[in-house]
């Protein structure tokens, strides 16, 4: 008998399992795919996409940036097979790393599809059809999400593909048409643009990465256009078909203009949906909400006592670090502790180059809520560090309360934004004012100085380097 069985080994599930083990519980983790611990994030998400982004970034720099540093390289070529093999080996290293962590924490791993027999009994069906049952006091559902499509588009996984196939193509597309200008669209679009493909994004809304601050979206659009990516914003896709090696995507602009695009691959990146297929939720009387997600209360416990759910399978941002926080939260809640998650302070990142990263509220959200605010915006091109590296695009934007000066949102588009944003998270966690940050020493020369300068502007409009 286990104290806790975790179903799903993504960043939510495996981190929950480790925290439960640290707290002294006897833990089992069940993963559908044999020897592939780590879920979407490790196998077909965060890790492989960043491996491809980094490889393609090097190629792009060698072709277009080295010369400005006085470095001449001739005959730069991509060995795409090797590039994809490298990605696969990085995924494998992460799979093995998580398997090591399970062993280290004495967590029993069961490979196979888990489904509820009762709330205390989970059947595990392995790929070879063999079955076993696990008895447990409590269960954490961490089964994650899968890509969605549009009702009128058939994903054939060859020419009309999802992010999963886009991470393992056998050739560089000639013309990749992407439906959806969200995070996956801009990240995987960047990979293939840098490798030489023509890339066209068709986005329903009027802006790229709609969840981000309007100014960040506009700056990203400007930079990606400059790099050669093509866009149809405010354009609704109405169809996508494949014939042989060709795809045709049809769409309609807001003004009613018809658009027809022809390419060799079409990536459908219109979001993901919670994954609960074959989980046997009906056997314990659990229903999903209108979007197929498992419903939970403020303790992330479902309507069935002792059954919890975390990560992409429940409401909220579909992010690996959100799933991790929830894994820790549930483990500590079960142990009788009183953990807390500040959902407003979970940062979001798009790994374009430059990167976009944000935490807290956007300017448009605060204005819509009638909040009196002030903003400070500092461009990277005014920084010595940015001039030295040649990464001049972008800015840091800090939004503060007009009266109290408390920081309410930080939005960055620029080199290393993904790593810089944590200063905004710490500032907001401790409810810092813009002046607090502006009075802290920031190392020179670094990109982080843009954050200090943006705070100086927000608090008193007195930048030192502009
Ligand atoms: P998942 O990671 O989806 O894991 C669920 C696991 O449960 C899977 O291994 C699945 O096989 C298993 N499972 C499902 N049903 C069963 C069952 N019945 N029995 C046993 N096992 C089962 N997020 C970021 O924060 N940063 C990024 O850079 C980032 N990049 C991404 C790039 C791409 C291309 C994609 C698609 C996603 C990316 N994400 C990123 C999102 C991130 O991957 C997810 O938010 C995260 O993986 C969710 O974690 P999870 O533990 O909830 O579920
Ligand atoms: P998304 O929600 O970020 O973007 C989907 C986009 O598709 C939206 O902009 C939407 O307006 C558009 N769209 C929907 N229907 C359309 C239509 N008919 N025509 C044209 N456009 C249409 O979803 P995603 O990019 O598929 O990513 C899925 C999830 O994975 C996200 O929740 C994201 O958080 C996560 N993810 C995170 C990262 C990261 O953290 N760096 C990277 C990749 C994925």
Image (cartoon, rainbow, N blue to C red):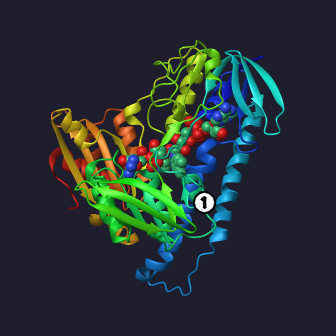
Q: Quadrant of residue 435?
A: top left
Up the image or down, 303 lies above or below 403; here it is above
Residue 143: x %, y % from top left: 61, 33
Q: Residue at x 59, y 15 (%)?
A: 285
At a point 18% along the width and 33% down the height, the residue shown is 371
Q: Residues within 10 Å of mark 1 (few under 14, many from 20)?
A: some
Identify the residue at horizontal 60%, vertical 50% (top origin).
44
Q: What's the residue at 33%, 65% (across, down)?
A: 223
Number of marks = 1
Which quadrant does the C terminus fall into? bottom left
Residue designated by label 1:
158
Residue 158, position as x, y percentages in the image: 60, 60
Whether residue 373 appears in this view of the structure is: yes
Q: Is residue 439 visible?
A: no
User: For this rendering, which residue is in front, 84 or 430?
Assistant: 84
Residue at the top extreme, as displayed: 305
Tag 1 secondary structure: loop
In this orientation, which residue lies closer to the viewer: 437 or 223?
Answer: 223
Relative to 47, say whether 118 is above or below. above
Residue 403, percent from left and from top: 15, 33
Q: Position of residue 354 (x, y in %)?
A: 39, 61
């Amino acid at each position: 008998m286990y104290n806790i069985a975790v179903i799903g080994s993504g960043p939510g599930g495996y981190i929950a399992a480790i925290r439960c083990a640290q707290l002294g519980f006897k833990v089992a983790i069940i993963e559908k795919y044999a020897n592939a611990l780590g879920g979407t994030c490790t196998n077909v998400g965060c890790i492989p996409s960043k491996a491809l982004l980094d490889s393609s970034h090097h190629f792009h720099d060698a072709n277009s940036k080295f010369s400005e540093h006085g470095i001449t390289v001739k005959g730069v070529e991509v060995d795409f097979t090797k590039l994809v093999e490298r990605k696969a080996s990085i995924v494998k290293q992460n799979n093995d790393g998580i398997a090591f962590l399970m062993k280290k924490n004495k967590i029993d791993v069961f490979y196979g599809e888990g489904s509820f027999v009762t709330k205390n009994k989970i059947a595990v069906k392995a790929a070879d059809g063999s079955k076993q049952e696990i008895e447990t006091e409590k269960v954490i559902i961490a089964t994650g999400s899968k890509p969605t499509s549009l009702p009128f588009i058939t994903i054939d996984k060859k020419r009309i593909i999802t992010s999963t196939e886009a991470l393992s193509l056998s050739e560089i597309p000639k013309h990749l048409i992407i439906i959806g200008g969200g995070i996956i669209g801009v990240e995987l679009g960047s990979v293939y643009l840098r490798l030489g493909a023509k890339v066209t994004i068709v986005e329903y809304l009027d802006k790229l990465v709609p969840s981000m601050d309007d100014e960040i979206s506009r700056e990203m659009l400007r930079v990606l256009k400059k790099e050669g990516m093509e866009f149809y914003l405010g354009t609704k896709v109405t169809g996508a078909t494949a014939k042989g090696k060709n795809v045709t995507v049809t769409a309609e602009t807001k003004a009613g203009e018809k658009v027809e695009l022809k390419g060799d691959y079409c990536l459908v990146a219109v979001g993901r949906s919670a994954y609960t297929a074959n989980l046997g939720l009906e056997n314990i009387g659990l229903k999903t909400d209108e979007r197929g997600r498992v419903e939970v209360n403020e303790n992330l416990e479902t309507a069935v006592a002792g059954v919890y759910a975390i990560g992409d399978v429940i409401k909220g941002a579909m992010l690996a670090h959100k799933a991790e926080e929830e894994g820790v939260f549930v483990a500590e809640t079960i142990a009788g502790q009183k953990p807390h998650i500040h959902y407003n302070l979970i940062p979001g990142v798009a790994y374009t180059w430059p990167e976009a990263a944000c935490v807290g509220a956007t300017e448009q959200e605060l204005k819509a809520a009638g909040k009196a605010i002030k903003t400070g915006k500092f461009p990277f091109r005014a920084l010595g560090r940015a001039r030295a590296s040649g990464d001049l695009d972008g800015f840091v934007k800090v939004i503060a309360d007009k009266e109290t000066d408390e920081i309410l949102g930080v939005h960055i588009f620029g080199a290393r934004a993904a790593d810089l944003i944590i200063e905004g998270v710490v500032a907001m966690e401790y409810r810092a004012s813009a002046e607090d940050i502006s009075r802290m020493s920031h190392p020179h020369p670094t990109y982080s100085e843009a954050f200090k300068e943006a705070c100086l502007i927000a608090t008193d409009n007195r930048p030192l380097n502009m």
